[in-house]
């Protein structure tokens, strides 16, 4: 189960809904009942340090 962020276009309420990745349900706002839109957030993954890029391994034997 994945957790997705939604926002209501009418009352601007932001909330999260948990559902499987293969399902695309019609989500309604818990405050006003209007259909909500999915919000795409940036990823929380940050790659720091060496070893994450293809060029990090070249020239080392």
Image: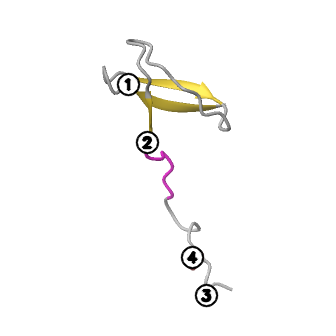
Give yes or no for residue 24 being in the magenta stretch. Answer: no
Identify the residue under disc 3.
59
Q: CA distance from mark 3 to mark 2?
A: 37 Å
Image quarter for residue 22?
top right
Q: Is residue 57 left or right of residue 30?
A: right
Mark carried by residue 56: 4
Q: Secondary structure at mark 3?
A: loop
Q: Is residue 47 above or below residue 54?
A: above
Q: CA distance from mark 2 to mark 4?
A: 29 Å
Identify the residue under disc 2.
41
Q: Quadrant of the C terminus?
A: bottom right
Pinpoint residue 35: horizontal percent, then vertical percent.
44, 23
Given contact means CB atoms under 8 Å apart, are the residues at marks 3 and 2 in contact? no
Residue name at image x 48 percent, y 53 percent: 46
Pinpoint residue 54: horizontal percent, then vertical percent.
59, 75
Which badge, 1 or 2, is on the more N-terminal residue?
1
Which badge, 3 or 1, is on the more N-terminal residue?
1
Q: Is residue 21 left or right of residue 13?
A: right
Q: Is residue 51 left or right of residue 29?
A: right
Given contact means CB atoms under 8 Å apart, are the residues at marks 3 and 4 in contact? no
Residue name at image x 47 percent, y 31 percent: 5
Mark 1: give few (<14), some (14-19) or many (20+) Cα within 10 Å.
many
């Amino acid at each position: 189960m994945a957790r997705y962020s939604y926002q209501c276009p009418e009352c601007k309420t932001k909330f999260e809904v948990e559902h499987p990745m293969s399902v695309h349900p019609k989500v309604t706002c818990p405050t006003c009942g209007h259909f909500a839109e999915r919000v795409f957030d940036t990823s929380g993954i940050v790659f720091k340090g060496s070893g994450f890029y293809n060029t990090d391994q070249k020239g080392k034997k």
